[in-house]
Image: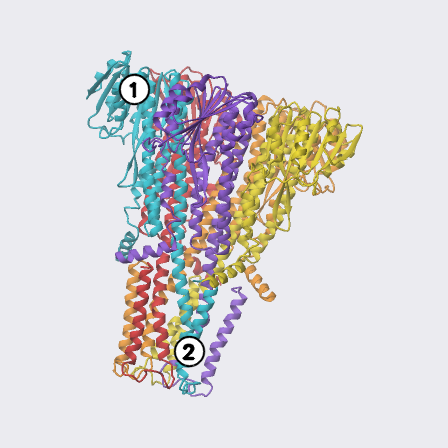
Chain colours: A orange, B red, C cyan, D purple, E yellow
Amino acid sequence: MNATKYASEKYLRYLLPGSLFNSKRTKQILNANPIDDVTRKDAKDIQITVYDYNVGELKEYEFKSIEPTFPFKNNQQNTWINIDGIKKSDIEIIAQHYAIHPLIVEDILSVNQRPKMDEVDEQLYCLLNMLYFNVKDSTVEQEQVSIILGKDYVITFQEDPQRDVFNPIREKLRQSHSKLRQRGADYMCYSLLDLIVDNYFFVMEGLSEKIEQLEDEIIRNSNKRSLAKINQLRKELIVLKRNIAPVRDLIGGIVRSESELLEEGTATYFKDVHDHITQAYDLSENYRDVMLTMQDLYINNVNLKMNEVMKVMAIVTCLLAPATVIGGVFGMNFDVIPTAHNEWGFYMAVGLMLLIIVGMLIMFKRRGWF
Amino acid sequence: MNATKYASEKYLRYLLPGSLFNSKRTKQILNANPIDDVTRKDAKDIQITVYDYNVGELKEYEFKSIEPTFPFKNNQQNTWINIDGIKKSDIEIIAQHYAIHPLIVEDILSVNQRPKMDEVDEQLYCLLNMLYFNVKDSTVEQEQVSIILGKDYVITFQEDPQRDVFNPIREKLRQSHSKLRQRGADYMCYSLLDLIVDNYFFVMEGLSEKIEQLEDEIIRNSNKRSLAKINQLRKELIVLKRNIAPVRDLIGGIVRSESELLEEGTATYFKDVHDHITQAYDLSENYRDVMLTMQDLYINNVNLKMNEVMKVMAIVTCLLAPATVIGGVFGMNFDVIPTAHNEWGFYMAVGLMLLIIVGMLIMFKRRGWF
Amino acid sequence: MNATKYASEKYLRYLLPGSLFNSKRTKQILNANPIDDVTRKDAKDIQITVYDYNVGELKEYEFKSIEPTFPFKNNQQNTWINIDGIKKSDIEIIAQHYAIHPLIVEDILSVNQRPKMDEVDEQLYCLLNMLYFNVKDSTVEQEQVSIILGKDYVITFQEDPQRDVFNPIREKLRQSHSKLRQRGADYMCYSLLDLIVDNYFFVMEGLSEKIEQLEDEIIRNSNKRSLAKINQLRKELIVLKRNIAPVRDLIGGIVRSESELLEEGTATYFKDVHDHITQAYDLSENYRDVMLTMQDLYINNVNLKMNEVMKVMAIVTCLLAPATVIGGVFGMNFDVIPTAHNEWGFYMAVGLMLLIIVGMLIMFKRRGWF
Amino acid sequence: MNATKYASEKYLRYLLPGSLFNSKRTKQILNANPIDDVTRKDAKDIQITVYDYNVGELKEYEFKSIEPTFPFKNNQQNTWINIDGIKKSDIEIIAQHYAIHPLIVEDILSVNQRPKMDEVDEQLYCLLNMLYFNVKDSTVEQEQVSIILGKDYVITFQEDPQRDVFNPIREKLRQSHSKLRQRGADYMCYSLLDLIVDNYFFVMEGLSEKIEQLEDEIIRNSNKRSLAKINQLRKELIVLKRNIAPVRDLIGGIVRSESELLEEGTATYFKDVHDHITQAYDLSENYRDVMLTMQDLYINNVNLKMNEVMKVMAIVTCLLAPATVIGGVFGMNFDVIPTAHNEWGFYMAVGLMLLIIVGMLIMFKRRGWF
Amino acid sequence: MNATKYASEKYLRYLLPGSLFNSKRTKQILNANPIDDVTRKDAKDIQITVYDYNVGELKEYEFKSIEPTFPFKNNQQNTWINIDGIKKSDIEIIAQHYAIHPLIVEDILSVNQRPKMDEVDEQLYCLLNMLYFNVKDSTVEQEQVSIILGKDYVITFQEDPQRDVFNPIREKLRQSHSKLRQRGADYMCYSLLDLIVDNYFFVMEGLSEKIEQLEDEIIRNSNKRSLAKINQLRKELIVLKRNIAPVRDLIGGIVRSESELLEEGTATYFKDVHDHITQAYDLSENYRDVMLTMQDLYINNVNLKMNEVMKVMAIVTCLLAPATVIGGVFGMNFDVIPTAHNEWGFYMAVGLMLLIIVGMLIMFKRRGWF
């Protein structure tokens, strides 16, 4: 039994390559437990960059520890503190100095948290995920980003020190005529959110590339992996939508909030991000529709192929069965078989067979079977 | 292997013609990235037409550059400036003169933007798409149109200088007794929106023509292309709905807005456009329903044909199998075969065969297989 | 090829009678363009009836032209002017006298308009469709009705002079003790809406009759037309829902409106119509559910029949195949065939065949194939 | 043809017993016309019970006519008048005395009305259906109940004098320490609604019993009736949901209403009924989900059985076809057949047959077909 | 017949093991009657633990009866009374002392109640279910928990004295520096709700583990139990969602309520629980999606296997049928058979057979059947 099972498994693995049906990915997607604080491992080292700026000047600093960031709190300048890599002890130190609410500290340290926005104690807190599209695995990867907007300062926390997506912001900061320099910390917060949301479109671009390829593949040859790939992309769409929908609420919340941290002129900008995230949401709905259309197409192709196979089989069977019977009839070992001794008997029998075949062919043609 | 694959592909291409399964169209539909500002290419040349009017007189101008449009800003007359073809530098020049917010400039220059409405700095901004139905490809094409309503002036931006859909407006302008001449810039804005929304119905008319043709085709002969065509139309419906739903919100927003740019009497007109776009939305839902009904019909037809093929095959197999066995039995080379030497043996055997066939026919008839 | 295609078409037409798959009906349903004002043809002649009434007396007039209706505008009596047949010129004349807004005139003249309600310039305007069920074609037919409620007068516009559905109202008017006589024009407006909504239930009654017949047919014999009929009814349900849903909004709008045209006591009556239309809406949802249930039933029946055919075929094939082989084995022309010269050889071979058949029968029985 | 059709019908009736596919039940469910007042037949006789009570004493009366109920209107005591059996003339008499609005009278006399709640002229009117589960037919039966709450009195109207579901209320009334006696008429109204809503759970209990039985049946043996039964229960679920959803709105309306008829302390009780009906609504959603799960299960079982039949047939066909060919080859009547005169020829041929069969068996096993 | 049925049942039981299709579980899930107060059996013995605390000190008590809990009502300390095991008489005693509303008492005693929240008489009442995941049966088990928050005290009621999930709370209580000790009774209420909601994630973790296993199994070998297992998990998801959705409303209700029992600073904490339960809700939606994806995958795998079986059968049939006919033709017993006496006749016939087979193989290859 065991050997058979093994063989069958091997066969099925060939039929549906395991790498496509990544059940571990399923678990990753489903097992989003935000409270299990054991899962968060401290980053090995953290990188802190501080940008202290006003219209006139910009000072850049790079630190390896938390303490040097303390003086920027009340220095009358706009300050952006970016912390790359999350270490529980350090977060707690900075939280104490900048008076960050314990619940927000918990959120910063959490894993797999749902995007959310909170306004506590004169600070506006946003938690959301930066998304990346891993072209090789066709997966949507996420990195949790926390943004705290206070009076004159913005603090950001990123999980992965390896990749830092805020470079465009840095470049704009270095240009003294840029809006970023001319406006306050709330505009910095807008810029960060805008960058993250804009990135969602690049992730979707990657997905749409894959969808196009897959559709092309299905059209050319609906093979056994097609549904596997459809299912895989459907799962990644779950990750995508899970991020977009709450971010829409988050930014909608900022737009509606009447926080004193937001200057009047910045509201228009946040409304603009809201338009973008709404479009992203609509688009993700379209992805789902196209996916379903594609699944219908795949199933139809498989069925059409199958139907054709069956039709050919039916036709061949029908055409030859009467001939078999006639052959059998005249092959019977009776003493007296009519026309058996007739010189043209054989030809008459074969002729009868051909006649039936031709007759059936005409009939099938009429019925539109070809 | 390669040759086989090639043959198979060729075969499948015959089965499902590639032009129907346009995966590039899928990418176009899905890849709506509004932020990738590289995609917008400057138009080669732009055409500017200006209509300066009041109840008494209408002056028409045609310019090739932006600057001559400047004097119309505060000239106490109603002015409609229509800019055909989008050139970044020109847009920025006019934006500066007419005090258009930078975010709106960004929107005008954007590509694939979701229809939206904004009210900034005493200007009402609408971005939406003019839709065309390409009868040849059965695709819904879109051209982005931006409308800015200011105090006494309306500025419109169109992408494609080749086709200009605002001709009916021009003709009405030339009639001094028309409402357009008698009322202010807000009525001009209404007229433009009304024209665009009314055009949606013509696009739907084109689509319904195609749907009717397709349904007719499926009824007459559900062939292999039918589902492909259904899928193709489903994708175009996505484009349609993606435009209609946000335009409904957009116009609803204008109706609810209490902008000072809108005179009281014009509200009724905007409410009327809102009724139209709502009907368009309802209708697009109906299209989807009819599409699903058609898909059910197609699948059912395919299955009915298949079932019939199988039934004929089953009947032929069942009818002739016993005869084959009897033929085999009496064809065995035993020395002693009962009735083998009987003069009527052959006829008895053949008679038995016919008897079984007739018996089965009667039974099948009873079971309603015919 | 052509002849074949023709034959195939003929065959399919037999399979799925064209009258059932009325693709023209599809176009009618989908192509609801309310702005194409060319489609409205002027009625040949119009019939105008005027009812001038108060509690004490009722005066009935019948006119062929518009002008005689002018004096009723401010005569301190309740007046109902019913115009049967729509002629553009006449509508414009009466609109001028009764100060009807140009947009409402446009709506009265429109075709395939979505039911709507508007309150402009001290007039309350309702546009909705009277529905009829055409038993012969199983189609839901609609006739556009416009109702204008002004101070002390109601004007109604009907498309088709042939059929007039307001007779019950006329009869009630003639009874001096009826509520209609005792109350104002707003109650007349309520009575008209109530009559139209009540008529929807009769249309549904007609549909439910057809659904019951169809279900009965599917149960008795799921033939090839059943799905066609289901699809046809699904399309009519689209027409039904398209009328009911906006009428619900329309009446809800009247209930919520605080128009001075509506007396306080009449609100309860409008709320009652709202309850009726809500029930109609719920009911139409149920129709859809029953329709889906019926479709599942149909498909299941078709599959069960097919499965049975396949099972019989499988059984017959399996039972007789071994016999064929045995016959073949002993029919081989070898010199030495065991038991060939044995007197009982033939019987042993045939016995073996029967043994296998019986054995298989028992096995199949065990597996529950019968 | 006719005889055949008859036979086929008979056959199908056997396949799908007519009693299961009760198309008349479908019509009953769909044909809910609340305005057709001809359908309401006057009850033969009506039974009136009056309970006149305060904390201290309870007086019970039983009448056969309406008039004796008149004095209870303003007698400073709480009064519950229960009218079993609906007779148009009597309703109108009591309506006049108790100042019931004509529209409410119409509702009381209506048939198949949607549950609704109204507050007119210092009276709160509720119309809803008492549900019963008919275990024999597995149908959900309904009886229309009208409740009028006035100042110090409650009047209830029931359709069917045979079954009276308010007995638990009567028993509580007879206990002087019960809340019913200590509180006012609004609490009586609450008690009646609570009793009716609680009864919905018993109906669901009956349904769940049937669902469990059906699931059990499908697991044990998915026979031809299973889908019929699923469809039947789906239809009853329509009846259930049609009653629960509007009753939720009805009670929600009472909770939100700020009627002076409701004392402050009673609000908590109505909120409690609202919680119950919400749970009933949720539960009815779950029923639908379980139903769909069951349908999937049924279809899967049918397919699994079918697939197995096909697999066995395929295997038998494949195994024996080569043997048939070999038999045929050596059965040909050529003069020269290799090994024909060889002593072991026959055995070699048969051996070859067996070899092929064994080889195929091994191959099939490998592919996991067993 | 009976024996057959028995065999068939036995067969089906083997096909679809009964333990998987637990129809009793279905009944448990569906039959959630909250009003049937007979179902609640009194617990044999109850365990009462009382924690009387402020920042400075904590006193723990353990009682077996209700009366000793009375003095804690107004003792100016925060008190948590936890009652494990529900006995009707005891609940009524404590309700009287602590002035709990009779309706809340009814809810505490109810079974299968929908999670709800009420604010009556200066008490905030929450009823919800603690969920456990039974790994062995893959079922979601629930235990009803009632929480009453009063001025300075919290009373909790649990059904099952065996398992007590509040241990983490106890441990935090014992630490004098914990927030629990520093804050009031409202924070205790928050902590309890937070603990329960956090537990939902552990239940989901268990479910996701099962889903991953199942997906793995379906990928490796889509056997007959897979759909059964999918259906089973779908049912457990019903239980999960039935608990999460109303708890979200419940906590949302607390967040929105402006109860005086909640201190201002605690609102942020309740908002945090609300975020968690919202994420749990989103996640449960994702579970459903993944489940549907898995079902599609399963069905596709079953179909692919089936299609392959059919294809092999079709190919074998087609390849060998012509050979059978040729064998039959030359096996006919005519006197004159062409080439019969030819020395190479046999080889020519066999060669023809092989030729046809090879020709067909090439044709099938071209059509992509391999």
User: In screen coordinates, is A92 left or right of E200?
Assistant: right
Residue B326 image offset from top left, x and y in percent: 35, 75
Q: Secondary structure at mark 2?
A: helix
Gap in angstroms between the C-alphas marked 2 and 1: 93 Å
Nearer mark to the viewer, of 2 and 1: 1
Residue C296 image offset from top left, x and y in percent: 41, 48
Other residues around mark 2 within 10 Å, as few (<14) / some (14–19) / many (≥20): few
Q: Quadrant of residue C266?
A: top left
User: In screen coordinates, is C350 left or right of E191?
Assistant: left
Q: Which mark is residue C351?
A: 2
B62 versus A366 height, above or below: above
> Along the polypeptide, which appears first: circle 2 or circle 1?
1
Which amino acid, by three-letter code, is at mark 1?
Ser
Q: Which mark is residue C1?
A: none
User: In screen coordinates, is D52 left or right of A98?
Assistant: left
D177 versus B329 height, above or below: above
- Disc 2 with disc 1 on a shared chain: yes
Residues at marks 2 and 1 touching, judged by CB atoms closer than 8 Å: no
B361 versus C220 height, above or below: below
Residue D118 image offset from top left, x and y in percent: 44, 24
Other residues around mark 1 within 10 Å, as few (<14) / some (14–19) / many (≥20): few
Does residue D181 appear anywhere in the picture?
yes
* Residue located beneath label 1 in the image: C178
A229 versus D263 height, above or below: below
Between C67 and E363, the one nearer to me in the picture: C67
Between C317 and A316, the one nearer to me in the picture: C317
x 63%, y 22%: residue: A260
- Assign the N terminus of chain A to one quadrant of the image: bottom right
Q: Secondary structure at mark 1?
A: loop
Q: Chain of mark 2?
A: C
Q: Quadrant of residue C193?
A: top left
